[in-house]
Image: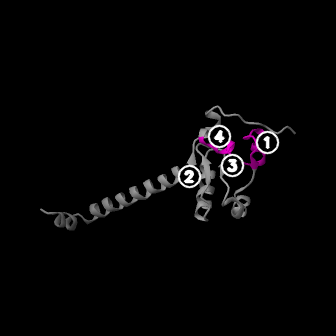
Amino acid sequence: MNIYEFINNNLIISAGLILSFLLLIFNELRIKKQQIANIDPYKAVQLINSGANIFDVRSAELFKKGHIVNSKNFNSEQITAKKKSLINKTTVVICETGQSSSKIVNEMRALGVENIFGISGGIAGWSEANMPLVSKKK
């Protein structure tokens, strides 16, 4: 029995196999794209020390409890509105877990902003790496 006979005799299995393969490729490409846009906290410190913008997209309450020094609290719409000013400036975006910042970074990259990165793990990853946070007193 050759491959053509097998496919013809097992159409559902063959279609499932092809679909699984395509989903696997799509998922791997999506992960690769996110990993390019995400950096670890140590690389973020290097960028921040080199003058990068740092935007915190968490709620104002969480921002007041603890944030990275010199970070600014913006929501995703405010960051998108700043697109033109971010094109030639390195920018780091952080959220609580890294999910929201990855989404924002990918959207901004799709709009042509190349030097924008999210911190892997968000504030949780930042804290886990024993990086300092400052808080705003009321």
Name above or below for residue 64 compared with residue 91: above
| Alpha carbon separation for disc pair 4 and 3 | 9 Å
- Magenta highlight range: 43-72
Task: Tell me the mark number nearer the camera, choosing from 1 and 4.
Answer: 4
Answer with left or right where residue 28 lies relative to residue 15: right
Q: Position of residue 30 (x, y in %)?
A: 48, 56
- Give the residue number, with chain letter if any, for mark 4: 45
Local secondary structure at mark 2: helix
Counting from the top left corner in percent of width and height, residue 67 is at 73, 41
Question: Mark 3 = which residue?
Answer: 52
The earlier-in-sequence mark between 3 and 2 is 2
- Residue drawn at (21%, 68%), measured in percent from left and top? 8
* Disc 2: which residue: 37
Q: Residue beneath label 1, please?
A: 64
| Mark 2 neighbour density, 10 Å: few (under 14) some (14–19) many (20 or more) | many
Closer to the camera, 82 or 98?
A: 82
Q: Nearer the viewer, residue 12 or 91?
A: 91
Looking at the rendered structure, the kind of residue marked 1 is Lys
Of label 4 and label 3, which has the lower sequence position? 4
